Image (cartoon, helix red, strand yellow):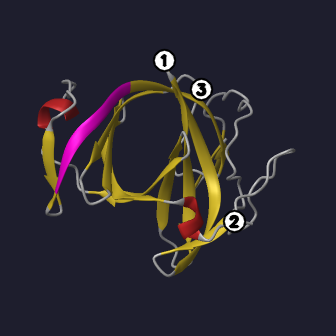
Amino acid sequence: MLRGDDGLKTVGTAAILPFDVSPIVIGTRGTTDGQAFEVVGRVRWGWTDGAWNEWLLTLADGSTRWLGEAMGTFMLLADAPLPALRDFADGGAIAPGLRVTVDGQDFVATDVKTATCIGAEGQLPFAAPAHWTITSVDFRNPDGASLSVQRDDRGTSAYCGRYVDLIDLAPTGLRRFDDWAMPKGLQ
């Protein structure tokens, strides 16, 4: 279902999200950059070698951030200006090693893959139908900054931020697992 100015409408079907081992759930709360946040939505992406989550955070000031989570690594990202990647936006390829600059920061492409939406839940600013496919490119810089550029049939978008340790977000309401001791400092 998609909520808009004209009410709710059906936009397609989504797969039921398979179980994963993320400690984050809808409703997890924490702080970033001096502001409280709450996790309100998630998109789970799959590709040939695995899967990752993109969690939507709503901050106290009404803005949003994305928390990317893959194999225990977290990236905190916000909308960013699209780097000068005209060929990519027009359907061309990007190879690892490509260098770009966004807001005065230099980045190097480290990961390029095609991913498919496995499922979605919660509140999202867009429809996330099952089998939605994107090309995703992750960029890094030596100072811990991160950049994610994604292209699909709707267009190309960029998200810039930084790598974070989960504990630095002071999360509460994390998922608990049987036979797993919550790391010290996490709730």
Answer left or right for 22 relative to 50. Answer: right
Q: Is 2 in front, or is 40? A: 40
Mark 2 or mark 3: which comes first in sequence? 3
Q: Residue furthest bottom?
A: 34
Mark 1 and mark 3 residues within 8 Å of each other at the beta carbon: no
Secondary structure, mark 3, is loop
Q: Nearer the viewer, mark 2 or mark 3?
A: 2
Image quarter (top left, top right, bottom left or bottom right) of the N terminus: top right
Front in this rendered view, residue 60 or 24 = 24
Question: In the rendered structure, which disc, 2 or 1, sits on the residue that comes first in sequence?
Answer: 1
Q: Which residue is mark 1?
A: 48
| Residue 186 - label | 2
The numbered mark at residue 27 is: none
- Going from the N terminus, do you reach mark 1 or mark 3 first? 1
Disc ID at residue 130 = 3
Residue at 63% across, 60% down? 39
Callout 3, which amino acid? Ala
* Magenta-drawn stretch contains 43: no
Residues in magenta? Answer: 106-113
Whole-Å distance between the Cαs marked 1 and 3? 16 Å
Q: Main secondary structure of the magenta part?
A: strand
Q: Secondary structure at mark 1?
A: loop
